[in-house]
Image: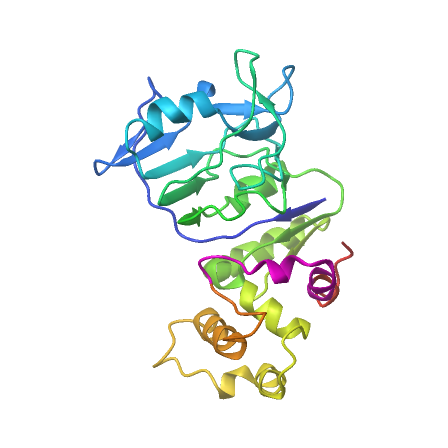
Amino acid sequence: MLISLIASPITAAAADEDTGVMTAGATTLEISTDEAFLWDSTTDQKTLAGINPEWYQENITAAGIQSISIKIPASTETIRKDFGGVYTGYNGYSSAGQELRPVNITCDQVFVDFSAATNLKTIGLQAFFQVSGLKIGTFNFFLFYGHCPKEETCVIADGAAIGPEMNRLYNQVKVKSNVKLYLPESFEWIILQSGIVDEKEIRTILLEPEQYIDSKDYFSWEQYFAKLLIRCTENTYLQYRKSKLNETYLHEKNKKMILESIKGIKF
């Protein structure tokens, strides 16, 4: 089993249990009510397909809401690969059994809260694809370890974000020998070390990054690698921007180079 996650801070707020809609400040709404979600099946609520377009229209679009927080339901085992993104190509089923096409989320800010998702096993690789203003909440690794299955499991997460918990994670891994962690420095670092951008400067820096990254100038190595990738691809077909992924990186040849550069994992 492969779990692919991005761990980064999420804005907290208090939920209204009666409506499943939460106000944070005056404009952020939490999506947590059953009526808001679509599922892949009418018989269970294990594969989350998307957001109900009728509920979204009434509660988000018509209300002029531009900041939402999606609380992934506790029963969710899989988030479908087209969840919320531009490629919402398959229908889902509401809690009332109605078949609907999931909505493409278009808010300015989208927070995703995994705090209740203790049964989550898989997140589709293109879930939330090109959703603007996306901020993925920190996945609760320690709840996951308490409920993880017995098969071989690989968790991929942002190493910079999970760094403060590394000692605790290490102790958990010693107990759960079937769980392996892959914690790269950042997504940009993966691209740089894959060789897609074939620059001698990049290869030299990656050999000894500590010789080039000054903490006075960069809060984290992630910031440095992002700036390096942006600079080295500027005005080329590989031009990189954090706000929107260049689709060139999704071409089969480039995807293969990226995945094959990740050692110790067979995709």
Question: Can you tell which quarter of the image residue 93 is in?
Answer: top right
Would residue 122 appear left or right of 185 to someone viewing this image?
right
Residue 147: x %, y % from top left: 61, 36
Would residue 191 appear left or right of 164 to someone viewing this image?
right
Would residue 35 appear left or right of 155 to someone viewing this image?
left
Which quadrant is home to the N terminus?
Answer: top right
- Nearest the eye: 3 or 190: 190
Which quadrant is home to the C terminus?
Answer: bottom right
Residue 243: x %, y % from top left: 44, 58
Coloured how? rainbow
- At horizontal 68% and vertical 75% (from top left) the residue drawn is 195
Residue 252: x %, y % from top left: 73, 58
Q: Does residue 159 show up?
A: yes
- At horizontal 63% and vertical 15% (from top left) the residue drawn is 42
- Nearest the eye: 37 or 249: 249
Q: Which residues are magenta?
A: 242-258
